[in-house]
Amino acid sequence: MRILIIEDERRLADNIGRSMREGAGYAVDLAFDGEEGLYMAESNPYDLVLLDLMLPRIDGKTVLQRMRTAGITTPVLVLTARDEKESIVAVLNSGADDYVTKPFDLGELVARSKALIRRGKGHGAPVLKVKDLEINTADRTVRRNGKLIVLSAMEYRVLEYLVHRSGAIISKTELLEHLYDFNWERFSNVIEVYISGLRRKLDDRNGDLIQTSRGQGYMLRN
């Protein structure tokens, strides 16, 4: 998953970004003012946006309103100071999905972010199941037929995204856009490498679980 953090307090933004990378395995992009954040939100397919309200150049509420007017349905988690709570109703009515009040616990923020991403993709529970495959998004563990499968961090991220979109053909471009941030150096065959590793570890060499659609991408059969 790939998230965007729009927060002008750089130290806080860096701390949140580090928690999201380490605690959830997400790719993270940072924006430090509302104008930059809005541009990035409109230019990239994010799975979640963390949005501060008090931003320079364009305030957070306006960023949110412009995102929704542009048809961007990405879940938005608002970061708000205690003295801004009277405005949170207006922000929720503008299209925010949830909010946390500063100062907040980073562990709680990660948990709320995971929940919003799941709900945004049509999953309420933290455990996702497809056939005999089970993914626990809370602790990032994978089991097939009850057997624990040990995956690399990136193999897990690829599989989690495919599970969230099970039954749909996912192009390599879409996978790359949701798995990497701006700092990634792109290599053309990286997705094939991770898919090959997943098939081997999941005992799916015949493609009964992960199907390749030649010229289109991959689909997790449901």
Image (cartoon, grey):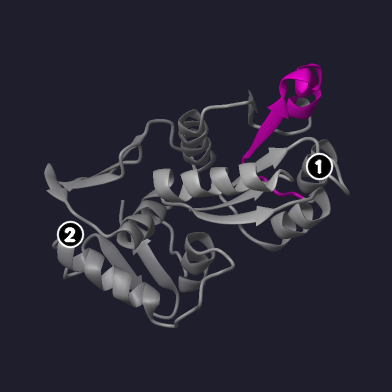
Q: Is residue 194 visible?
A: yes
Secondary element type, mark 2: loop
Q: Residues within 10 Å of mark 2 (few under 14, many from 20)?
A: many
The residue under label 1 is 55
Residue pictured at 57% horizontal, 27% vertical: 104
Q: Residues within 10 Å of mark 1 (few under 14, many from 20)?
A: many
Residue pictured at 18% horizontal, 54% vertical: 150
Check disc 2 and give the amino acid type. Answer: Leu
Left or right of residue 133: residue 64:
right
Left or right of residue 13: residue 135:
left
Decide which of tag 1 and tag 2 comes sooner along the chain.
Answer: 1
Q: Is residue 89 visible?
A: no
The residue under label 2 is 202
Position in image of residue 117 (x %, y %):
51, 41
Check disc 1 and give the amino acid type. Answer: Leu
Of residues 80 and 140, the one nearer the viewer is 80
Q: Is residue 25 above or below residue 96?
A: below
Of residues 137 and 84, the one nearer the viewer is 84
Q: Which residues are magenta?
A: 71-92
Q: Is residue 70 above or below residue 50?
A: below
Q: Is residue 166 above or below residue 155?
A: above
